[in-house]
């Protein structure tokens, strides 16, 4: 059996709304409501967050709380690197999506010679930088961090020198080189992008399987095509943002977008993709129970978590 380690990251610094730090405990409450013993099966590691920076106020309008985000990314990176060096399989439960950059940095640092592919199941492309962001929220930037893209061709902001210094430090966590090639990203259900991100998608020919294509072809075919596109990668990492789900389900998340996946589609998709032996880490992010009623989002997300984990165990 895969040596699974649960990694809990309660950071919410990089989200636009407060409350994502409570998502992990909301998942645990959902497991109790479903009378599941899931959380008794694995020893969790709790990664130190920097949510106390929220009390200090934000000094960086084009990269909100980047000083704290930098600290969290370093913590996530070192945790994931250690686990991968021990050949453990991290299942990451995280708050805001910026911490995915730390996860990728850790995977890459543990085995730098291996080419890493990323499957990003999300409503958003998360390819913004301090130079292009419309909001300043850094959960929209993790893939730019790990590809070391500034996207100056699409520049609309003038970040301060201190912001740029932190941004450069973040890009260098785990080594001063891109951790992934943008061409080794596959998006599924991304449907809310801005023109600077569209520029990068076109420039690098990044594939996005839209929800309509998922419906048209079916989950099995989409999973097969995704894995085929990443056939030259030695390792794969799957990041599942719950806002990839349709707004009829995804109320309990910071940035819901219509025309997303159903719970059934999300379950089938993750359970199918994780069967590939190259997958070395799986992650679920952005459950925010403060935006929800009756813990609906967490209950749906827990179903995805439990069934995906079972698929991983069953197909080892």
Image (tube, rainbow, N blue to C red):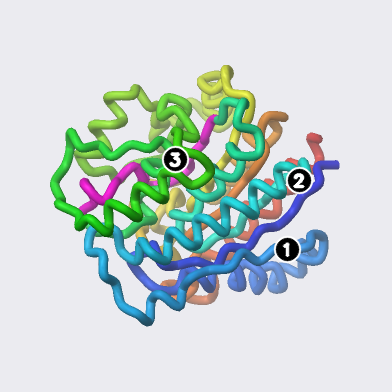
Residue drawn at (36%, 58%) of the image: 256
N-terminal label among 2 and 1: 1
Q: Position of residue 141 (x, y in %)?
A: 36, 49
User: At numbered mark 3, what does the secondary structure look like: helix, strand or loop?
Assistant: helix
State the residue lying farthest toward the bottom. Answer: 55
Give the residue displayed 53% in from the left and 56% down from the top. Answer: 74
Decide if residue 87 is on the left or right side of residue 76: right
Q: Which residue is mark 2?
A: 88
User: How far apart in space, not on screen, are marks 3 and 1 (Cα)?
Assistant: 25 Å
**Of discs 3 and 1, which sits in the foreground?**
3
Assess whether mark 1 and mark 3 are in contact (beta carbons under 8 angstroms). no
Compare marks 3 and 1 and give the one earlier in the sequence: 1
Categorize mark 2 by other alpha carbons within 10 Å: few (<14), some (14-19), many (20+): some
SS at badge 2? loop
Task: Tell me the magenta residue range.
Answer: 117-134
Task: State whether residue 84 is above or below residue 181.
Answer: below
Which residue is the site of mark 1?
44
Check disc 1 and report its element: helix, strand or loop. strand
Q: Chief secondary structure of the magenta span?
A: loop
């Amino acid at each position: 059996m895969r040596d699974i380690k649960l990694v809990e990251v309660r950071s919410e610094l990089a989200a636009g709304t407060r409350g994502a730090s409570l998502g992990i405990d909301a998942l645990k409450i959902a497991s109790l409501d479903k009378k599941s013993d899931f959380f008794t099966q694995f020893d969790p590691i709790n990664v130190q967050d920097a949510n106390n920076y929220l009390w200090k106020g934000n000094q960086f309008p084009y990269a909100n709380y980047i000083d704290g985000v930098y600290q969290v990314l370093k913590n996530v990176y070192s945790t994931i690197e250690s686990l991968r060096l021990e050949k453990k399989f991290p299942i990451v439960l995280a708050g805001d999506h910026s911490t995915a950059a730390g996860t990728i940095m850790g995977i890459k640092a543990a085995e730098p010679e291996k080419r890493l592919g990323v499957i990003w199941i999300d409503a958003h492309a998360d390819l913004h930088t301090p130079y292009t962001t419309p909001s300043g929220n850094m959960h929209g930037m993790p893939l730019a961090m790990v590809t070391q893209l500034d996207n100056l061709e699409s520049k609309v902001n003038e970040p301060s020198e201190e912001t740029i210094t932190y941004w450069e430090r973040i890009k260098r966590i785990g080594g001063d080189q891109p951790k992934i090639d943008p061409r080794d990203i596959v998006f599924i259900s991304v449907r809310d992008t801005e023109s600077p991100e569209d520029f990068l998608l076109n420039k690098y020919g990044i594939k996005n399987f839209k929800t309509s294509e998922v419906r048209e072809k079916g989950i099995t075919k989409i999973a097969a095509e995704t894995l085929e596109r990443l056939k030259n990668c030695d390792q794969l990492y799957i990041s599942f943002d719950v806002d990839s789900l349709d707004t009829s389900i995804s109320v309990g998340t910071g940035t819901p977008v219509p025309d997303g996946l159903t719970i059934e589609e999300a379950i089938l998709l993750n359970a199918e993709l994780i069967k590939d032996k190259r997958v070395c880490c799986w992650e679920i992010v952005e459950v925010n129970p403060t935006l929800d009623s009756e813990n609906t989002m967490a209950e749906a997300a827990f179903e995805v978590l439990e069934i995906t984990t079972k698929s991983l165990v069953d197909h080892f």
